[in-house]
Amino acid sequence: MLVIGEIRTGLLQNAGEIPDPDYQRVLHVRHGERVLLSRRPIVYGVAPYQLIGVDCRLPSATGSRPRGIGTVMARTSLTSGRVLQGSSHVRIVRGEAGYRLPWSHYLARPGMIETLGKFKPADVADGFLSSAGIGGQLDLGSVSEHMMDLAQDCDALDRRAPFRSERTRLRWAATPGDPDIHFTLGVGGERTVRVSHPGDFSAAIVALCEDLALHDWLLTTLLSLVGRARIGVAPRTEVLARLAPAADALLHLWMPAARTERCLQPLWESLERTPGFTRQWTSLAQRVRDQIALGVLPLLSEANG
Amino acid sequence: MGVPVSAFSELTAEEQVKGTPFAHLSVELGHLYMEDYQVGPDRLREQFGQVAPWLETARKGWRGLVPGGRARISTCFLIDDYFSRFSTPREVIPMILAAAGESDLTIDYLARESACAQANGIPLATLVHDRLVRDPPPDTRGWRPPNDETGWLANGPRSPQQDSGQAMKAPQPWAPPAQNAKRGQSIFVDVELWTGDGADRVWSCPFLAAVWQLLRLGLLRHDGDLPVLPVQWEGGFPASWEALPPVIKLNHSAAPFSAYATMSVLSTRFLQVELAVRTILSQVSVDEVVLKQVTSRSLDEDLMLKEELVDRISYVFL
């Protein structure tokens, strides 16, 4: 059994954090649906899943590229009115028929792709995780990207983001096995995660990967902002001008595993040991605060005459 | 003392989906359009006379399927007040009930067709339209911008359009459309869902009929609630259609309006419309929580429902 997914994370194109009542508009829910909003320990809103139909070749490391038909689950979420995610995933199973069935068959199994003929889960997982940019096959990225674009197009947004930032792309694959996780940092904004889980696949694993993607984006973005500030090279005022938006927008968002199920928390903890996401964040955040404190010193001595 | 396990939950973070009681089968005894009304009550009497034996056949069949032989079957009738307004409830409904009575038929629920477009302020047709998941042609890899007329729905790729902007190019030879799930040969179906935008939107007959089936199957929710609940009706009928609730219950002891399966007895002149309905319904995604709710109820009664929702809909064409 195999479930694969892709999460895109980015900054909502709005000057400030959007208030709770606007989540319903920005997350583009359909008629008769409601954003599920939690306010503790951090505001997080998620729209119900939508389905996208596919009929295409599946990624594969060996080049076998089996054909699969079914529906991909996709949804958008927003954390603290600031960080937007488009997340899609699908379960891949072997179909019983050797030919394409009527569409109603696939809609009765939401979130599943059935292959025509055999497939090897490890082969498809390997192919998916290593397949950035390969065309002619399942493209979960386009689905996640589309979910984000729908939100960013909302006319409730002023399109004045507090700073320039990049979207990150996290592809993940989950297979049954002893609990284990492997996070790989790629080039550009690419990341991959392999999860193995005891028992059945659950929605909690999607939530874990989304949480990892969120925190990786926060870390990546803060690293980039600190890098661009040229601490020790540029004049202090310039450094502070670059860092102030980070202090305003990002420093309070770090809250790993806030909604991770208890049984999956050990997976987050293993990543806290190596490489140590929170360790790096704490150091960076402190560095930003130190710069701000250092920037205050000349003003204090001026004030004291 | 062990470490206490804290429990915290937030109501706004939880999905609340209401359930509903189910009949085993909902049988549509007929529907009234203006052209039927204009012909007079004889047409209605004739139709009810044809329907009656099929209702009895359905009852016998379900008695055999249901443990204990007690099948819950409810009947319904649909009146068009969307495509044309004719007469009044006060005149029309007693005529329908009298004609049904002559064939010993009881109409449990009566519905207005306009309810399928909008009922109690809920835009039902738009709600269903939002839940269309289009049948993907081969080599659909993910999301791509829709390139077709969004007021139409097909069961496969249409014939490629001639590129009218390129006058210098040689005309492309015609290529046929195709049915995605064809077995051998294609039966290509393209259905008009609506015309007009905003306040001018007019939903097509097949689309409203698809909404009607989903209502009868108890599969629609709005903010977690059933969008339409039948209102028990007593006494005389009002002089205007607006004064009548979207669905009324005429028989106190009727089985529930929502059912695990539906059956409709129709004239063969509606065969094309119902093919269009099936094409639409096979591209509607019902909320997974609702699907599981219905399955769970049916399993509690030791009943196995058909997996695909289109297979829960049956017809007799006369």
Image: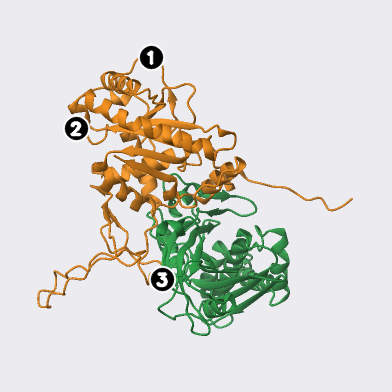
Front one among A220 and A177: A177
Image point 47% across, 76% down: which residue? A66
Q: Residue furthest top?
A: B235
Chain letter of disc 1? B
Judge whether residue A40 can be spotted in this image. Answer: yes
Which of discs 3 and 1 lies nearer the camera? The answer is: 1
Which residue is disc 2 drawn over? B35
Q: CA distance from mark 2 to mark 3?
A: 47 Å
Task: Choose the circle earlier in sequence order: 3 or 1.
Answer: 3
Name the amino acid type tagged 2. Glu
- In the image, the chain rendered in orange is B
Q: CA distance from mark 3 to mark 1?
A: 58 Å
* Callouts 2 and 1 in the same chain: yes
Task: Choose the circle earlier in sequence order: 2 or 1.
Answer: 2
Residue B254 point in image, percent of width and height: 47, 26
- Crowding near pointer 3: few (<14 within 10 Å), some, many (20+)? many
Which residue is disc 1 drawn over? B235
* Callouts 2 and 3 in the same chain: yes
Front one among A64 and B225: A64
* Callouts 3 and 1 in the same chain: yes
Which of discs 2 and 1 lies nearer the camera? The answer is: 2
User: Vertical placement of B180 versus B316: above or below?
Assistant: below
Name the amino acid type tagged 3. Arg
